[in-house]
Image: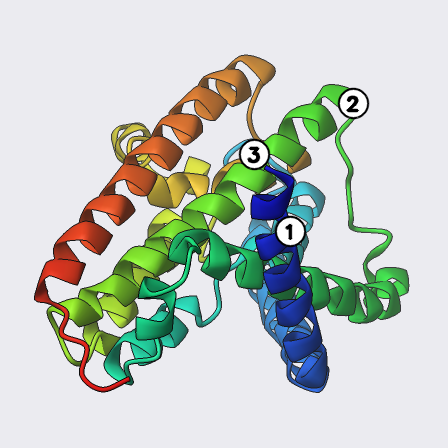
Amino acid sequence: MIAVLSKYRHAFFLGLQSNLIYRWNFAVRSCFSFFHLAVVFILWRAAYAGTPTIGGFAFGPTLTYFVTLIVLQFFIGAFNEDYQISEEIRNGLINQFLLKPINYFLYRFSIFTAARVVSGALVIVPLLAAFPLLREYLVLPEGLWRVALGLPAMAMAGFIQFTIAYCFGLLTFWFLDIQGFVILSLAVETILGGQMFPLDLMPPKLFHAAQLLPFYYQMYFPAAILTGRITRAAALQGLGMQAGWVLVLLAFGGFLWNRGLRKHTAVGG
């Protein structure tokens, strides 16, 4: 067991070193995310101009939700893992993993985790810089249970993010270009993942339908727990659904891997 864990520990540190080389890319991306936050501030400030609350929430909790989303994107978001996996399949680099006693999924997940450590650390800097401007608007909900449930929700959300990207990357076994699939997924995730607006503002029937999909648990669910948009009972029920999607996506990823290898042809050595 120690030898097995050691392999992926080395992969994690390799990914950490690789991402530190491109740390400025993450830093610039994190800074530009706060330009997005400025747009969100202006739009939602205008929306709240004629009413004190929208969907039962004042402006402060809504802004806190969007700030939390931005931070979560850097801690658990899958930025380009699907394209990296796709390139390794198209260029034949994946062949080396077929000849070694290493699990490709765990290897890529180790790299993903390392990247999230780097990007998550870098996003703290612009967040601290913006905090004096946002302090009077941010509203942190009471209750330590939100942290206790929010942390596992974040972990499983990151796993769901990665596994979906992993599955899209494996589509390269059948399609030379997966860009169309990825763009479609991002569009759906932006809406049903709560990145455009809090999902609880949707009509009740659509909101309940969204809770059945994995996109709900990618960003909105952990952000909603941490910012007080859902109750403890709803959070516990959501954790069960989230764990179910983790198992489903993990099984589907294994299915795509096994079927994809039957179509894969390795030439040379």
Quadrant showing the N terminus? top right
Query: Where is residue 58, by image quadrant?
Result: top right
Q: Could you say where residue 54 lies in the image, as x and y percent from the top left? A: 53, 40
Q: Which residue is mark 2?
A: 144
> In the rendered structure, are the residues bearing label 1 and label 2 in contact, judged by CB atoms less than 8 Å apart?
no
Query: Where is residue 115, by image quadrant?
Result: bottom right
Please give left or right for residue 27 compared with residue 45 in the image.
right
Along the line of sight, which residue is nearer the eye, 31 or 64?
Answer: 31
Along the line of sight, which residue is nearer the eye, 12 or 65?
Answer: 12
Q: Could you say where residue 93 lies in the image, as x and y percent from the top left? A: 35, 79
Which circle, 1 or 2, is nearer the viewer?
1
Q: Which residue is mark 1?
A: 6
Q: Residue at x 58, y 64 (%)?
A: 40
Task: Please state which amino acid type lies under the numbered disc 1.
Answer: Ser
> In the rendered structure, are the residues bearing label 2 and label 3 in contact, judged by CB atoms less than 8 Å apart?
no
Q: Which residue is mark 3?
A: 153
Please give left or right for residue 248 compared with residue 47 in the image.
left
